[in-house]
């Protein structure tokens, strides 16, 4: 039945107001056109059989009744047509991303969208999305705006809504009673499926995100000091530190040949004297969470965005102790980490000399010598934030000469590509990261005789490439597959660095997380704080630093 016919039927009176009838008809339309992922997930749990049919029918009606109640609550008076129109468009777009990429529209995903720059957003807009938005979103929305009845008088409209909500609530109760055990199991054991309810979960997440963001804005306070007892270990024999930290984007540890992947995706790094840490877990499943979290002292379990923004991070602590900190970004931004230190945007040809279609990560090395010369009497930390493997258009993340694995998916419409084509494009992007990191190492080697040089590569999160029906990232952490949380970490050290790789090698396969970054970098700059005491900090293996340590409680394994 077409949306126009549905609207015409809504003009009739079934004991409720015509406006309430319209709300119910829109609910049914969205349930039928925008909830494929929800019901497909339910069918994966409860296959379509005669035995399961009653419960499956109950679940469909249950979610329909819940959605109707939600619309009845948020749609009022003259605003009803506009609210319903907006929900139709949101449902159409949410359904596209859920159906095609398996993503969940939660607060993290909304935060990602809000922080996505124009270039990244363009990569997410596909012809399928446009067609779906027009046919199942914009056109039905226009019909609702044109034909949605005006509200009846206040008492009649209120009575009608109460009647409809009572009916929905009663229906929910009657639907649950015969299947109490089944619903208990479904609600407790299959949370991820419920998160695909469209558009109710997306709307709930949007409201939650707005509330949280407003709270952060209203409660802006002076920064909370972190590691206030930090002291320099003051090794007089040491040279100045020059460390480049590369923040990787959307890379999986299991796609690095350094970690045993069957394809040679790290041919250049394999020639260097490096350590690849094979068992590192990320703080989050998205850039907007992982990047500020890894530079925070909070750790994953205690991390909250508002807390992290309200206190100093690792870069602030280093800066306060005289270390020159520079952040160069070829991604969207630093997610609040580099707010108080020098920041340079390399997403534009204005700064990045290697921009052919897309600005390349290797361009962040341009004119870096000038910065180093200007700070030659100081320790330095240079952070390079990659574009890396940002999806879904993996083929755009590398120049054509790096397309060694073929055929590679050449579209952001991942569902239109085979699993092998997606893997090929993703692995080609890993090859380019291998090249970029090798260039960083070669750059640092020029300063080996002057400084204690090192490169630390830490990826922010992983990526799903179709495993279990998931694509991209940003799944809720408690439900995220390992592909989104198992990240690569690589360390290279120069000849004058305080730490011998042989001392650090025992940690190569240890269970590490982004939580270890804060104190590890502090120790690398010969800084110590009691907040790091008792932690298994690998760089404290250095005998000289142990003698200078602030705390006697540091554990050395």
Image (tube, rainbow, N blue to C red):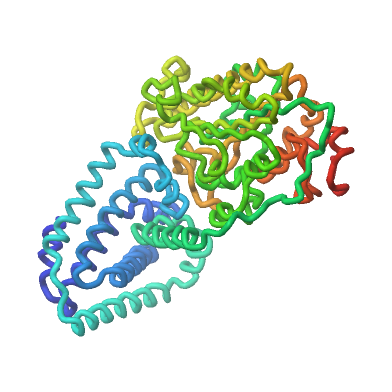
Q: Is residue 163 above or below residue 510?
A: below
Comparing 415 with 243, the one in front is 243
The percent position of residue 311, horizontal first and vertical second, equals: 61, 53
- The image quarter in which residue 399 lies: top left
Relative to 144, does residue 506 appear above or below in the rendering? above
Residue at horizontal 66 percent and vertical 27 percent from the top = 455
- Compared to residue 43, the image places residue 234 above or below, namely above
Residue at 78 percent across and 40 percent down: it is 232
> In the image, residue 193 lies at what x, y percent?
44, 56
Q: Nearer the viewer, residue 236 or 453?
A: 236
Name the image quarter holding residue 68: bottom left
Instruction: Classify residue 549 as left or right of residue 344.
Output: right
Position of the C terminus by quadrant: top right
Q: Quadrant of the N terminus?
A: bottom left
Q: Is residue 225 left or right of residue 347?
A: right
Q: Determine which quarter of the picture holds residue 269.
A: top right
Q: Nearer the viewer, residue 259 or 173?
A: 259
Count of numbered badges drawn on the protein: 0
Going 59% across and 23% down the picture, which residue do you hit?
437
Q: Position of residue 507 (x, y in %)?
A: 76, 35
Horizontal and vertical percent position of residue 243: 67, 29
Q: What residue lies at 38% left-to-right and 20% top-to-bottom?
A: 356
Which residue is nearer to you in this view: 323 or 193? 323
Q: Residue 10: in sight, yes or no?
A: yes
Residue 528 against residue 364 in the figure, above or below: below
In this orientation, does residue 481 appear? no
């Amino acid at each position: 039945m077409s949306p126009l016919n549905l609207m015409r039927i809504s003009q009739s009176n079934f004991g409720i107001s015509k406006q309430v009838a319209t709300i119910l008809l829109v609910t049914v339309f969205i349930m039928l056109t925008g909830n494929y992922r929800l019901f497909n997930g339910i069918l994966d749990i409860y296959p379509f059989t005669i035995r399961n049919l009653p419960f499956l029918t109950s679940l469909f009606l249950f979610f329909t009744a819940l959605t109707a109640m939600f619309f009845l609550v948020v749609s009022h008076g003259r605003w009803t047509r506009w609210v319903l129109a907006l929900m139709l468009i949101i449902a159409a777009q949410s359904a596209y991303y859920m159906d095609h990429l398996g993503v969940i529209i939660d607060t993290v995903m909304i935060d990602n969208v809000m922080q996505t720059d124009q270039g990244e957003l363009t990569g997410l807009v596909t012809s399928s999305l446009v067609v779906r938005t027009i046919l199942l979103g914009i056109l039905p929305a226009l019909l609702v705006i044109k034909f949605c009845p005006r509200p009846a008088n206040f008492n009649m409209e209120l009575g009608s809504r109460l009647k409809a909500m009572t009916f929905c609530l009663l229906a929910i109760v009657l639907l649950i009673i015969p299947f109490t055990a089944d619903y208990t199991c479904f609600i407790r054991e299959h949370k991820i499926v419920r998160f695909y309810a469209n558009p109710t979960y997306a709307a709930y997440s949007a409201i939650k995100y707005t509330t949280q963001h407003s709270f952060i804005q209203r409660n802006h306070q002076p920064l909370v000091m972190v590691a206030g007892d930090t002291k320099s270990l003051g090794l007089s024999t040491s040279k100045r530190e020059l460390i480049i930290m590369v923040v990787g984007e959307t890379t999986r540890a299991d796609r690095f040949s350094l970690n045993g992947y069957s394809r040679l995706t790290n041919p250049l790094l394999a020639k260097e004297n490096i350590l690849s840490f094979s068992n590192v877990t990320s703080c989050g499943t998205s850039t907007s969470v992982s990047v500020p979290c890894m530079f925070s002292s909070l750790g994953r379990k205690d991390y909250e965005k508002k807390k992290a923004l309200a206190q100093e991070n690792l870069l602030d602590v280093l800066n306060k102790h005289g270390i020159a900190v520079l952040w160069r970004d070829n991604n969207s931004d630093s997610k609040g980490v580099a707010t108080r230190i020098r920041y340079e945007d390399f997403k534009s040809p204005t700064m990045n000399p290697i921009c052919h279609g897309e600005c390349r990560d290797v361009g962040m090395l341009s004119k870096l010598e000038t910065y180093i010369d200007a700070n030659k009497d100081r320790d330095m930390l240079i952070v390079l934030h990659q574009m890396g493997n940002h999806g879904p258009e993996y083929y755009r993340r590398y120049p054509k000469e790096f397309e060694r694995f073929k055929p590679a998916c050449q579209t952001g419409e991942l569902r239109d590509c085979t699993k092998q084509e997606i893997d090929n494009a993703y692995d080609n992007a890993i090859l380019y990261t291998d090249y970029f990191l090798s260039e960083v190492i070669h750059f640092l080697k020029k300063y080996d005789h002057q400084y204690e040089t090192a490169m630390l590569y830490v990826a922010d999160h992983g990526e799903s490439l179709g495993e279990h029906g998931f694509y991209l990232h940003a799944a809720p952490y408690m439900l995220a597959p390992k592909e989104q949380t198992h990240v690569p970490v690589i360390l290279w050290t120069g000849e004058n660095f305080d730490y011998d790789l042989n001392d650090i090698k025992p940690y190569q396969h240890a269970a590490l997380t982004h939580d270890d970054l804060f104190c590890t970098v502090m120790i690398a700059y010969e800084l110590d704080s009691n907040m790091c005491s008792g932690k298994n900090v690998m760089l404290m293996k250095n005998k000289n630093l142990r003698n200078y340590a602030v705390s006697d409680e540091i554990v050395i394994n």
